[in-house]
């Protein structure tokens, strides 16, 4: 029987974490680390170069051309549908966990949990299984009863979803507030609440996520320009 050889790519913006992950993975004869990336730019380049089976990636990696968080993993899912993904994060936001699960990323580790969960998670990912480290499993179990739909944005309130659709369509917070007859503070709060529930950290990732999920508002339009003052004809 041919021995198992799992080709793994690592991605994390902290050098010490990358070294630690690689060291842990190399403890297994069944794992070969094919590369290590510090952001989404390097990750995408390495995915082009190497025929890897599993990606072990941090959730938040600022600075890359392809962003990070849910938007990045949605992009990876689209481009590399057969690639298995293990996500590691310090964030214990229920929105992040459920958004990843809904996206088809069922192996999620909290960096605060023991590193002993890493290899089992890699093997679970390879076997199309699910692996949540203890703190992530507790959060997922505690918040699951409140969810009724498979789409991540189903957890948003009607008003939050309305704001997200308009923002993704290109309107500013000020324009949305004017169109919906709400204060700028209210719109900012609803937008921020939506991003928290979705596990999205930056505006650019919210726009990318919304475009990929078809959350554009076709009825949204830029605010009309005020009429030009009449010019007297002499």
Image: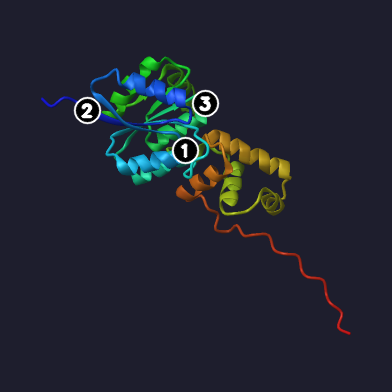
Count residues near mark 3 (Cα–Cα under 10 Å), then give few for <14, some for 14-19, many for 20+.
some
Q: Secondary structure at mark 1?
A: helix
Disc with the residue nearer the chain's start (3 vs 2): 2
Count residues near mark 1 (Cα–Cα under 10 Å), then give few for <14, some for 14-19, many for 20+.
many
Residue 132 is at least partly visible in this image:
no
Look at mark 1 in the image and give the residue it sits on.
Answer: 70
In which quadrant is the C terminus drawn?
A: bottom right
Q: Is residue 50 above or below residue 141?
A: below
Q: In front of the other: label 3 or label 2? A: 2
- Please tell me which residue is depicted at 72% across the width and 45% down the height of the picture: 184
Disc with the residue nearer the chain's start (1 vs 2): 2
Left or right of 78, for residue 204: right
Outermost residue toward the left? Answer: 1
Look at mark 3 in the image and give the residue it sits on.
Answer: 91
32 or 144, nearer to the observer: 32
Q: Give residue 201's position: percent from left, percent from top.
A: 56, 36
């Amino acid at each position: 029987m041919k021995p198992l050889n799992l080709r793994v790519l690592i991605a994390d913006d902290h050098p010490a974490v990358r070294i630690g992950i690689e060291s842990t993975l190399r403890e297994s004869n069944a794992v070969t680390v094919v590369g290590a990336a510090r952001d989404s730019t390097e990750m995408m380049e390495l995915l082009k170069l190497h025929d890897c089976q599993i990606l072990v990636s941090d959730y938040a990696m600022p600075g890359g051309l392809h962003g990070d968080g849910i938007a990045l993993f949605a992009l990876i899912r689209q481009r590399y549908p057969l690639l298995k993904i293990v996500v590691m994060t310090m964030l214990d936001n229920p929105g992040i966990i459920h958004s990843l699960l809904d996206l088809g990323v069922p192996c999620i580790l909290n960096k605060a949990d023991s590193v002993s969960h890493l290899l089992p998670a890699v093997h679970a990912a390879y076997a199309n299984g699910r692996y949540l480290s203890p703190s992530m499993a507790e959060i997922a179990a505690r918040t699951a009863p409140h969810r009724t739909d498979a789409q991540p944005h189903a957890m948003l309130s009607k008003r939050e979803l309305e704001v997200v659709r308009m923002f993704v369509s290109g309107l500013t917070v000020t324009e949305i507030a004017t169109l919906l007859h709400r204060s700028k503070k209210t719109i900012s709060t609803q937008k921020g609440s939506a991003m928290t529930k979705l596990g999205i950290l930056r505006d650019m990732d919210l726009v990318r996520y919304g475009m990929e999920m078809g959350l554009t508002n076709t009825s949204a339009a830029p605010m009309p320009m005020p009429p030009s003052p009449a010019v007297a004809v002499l």
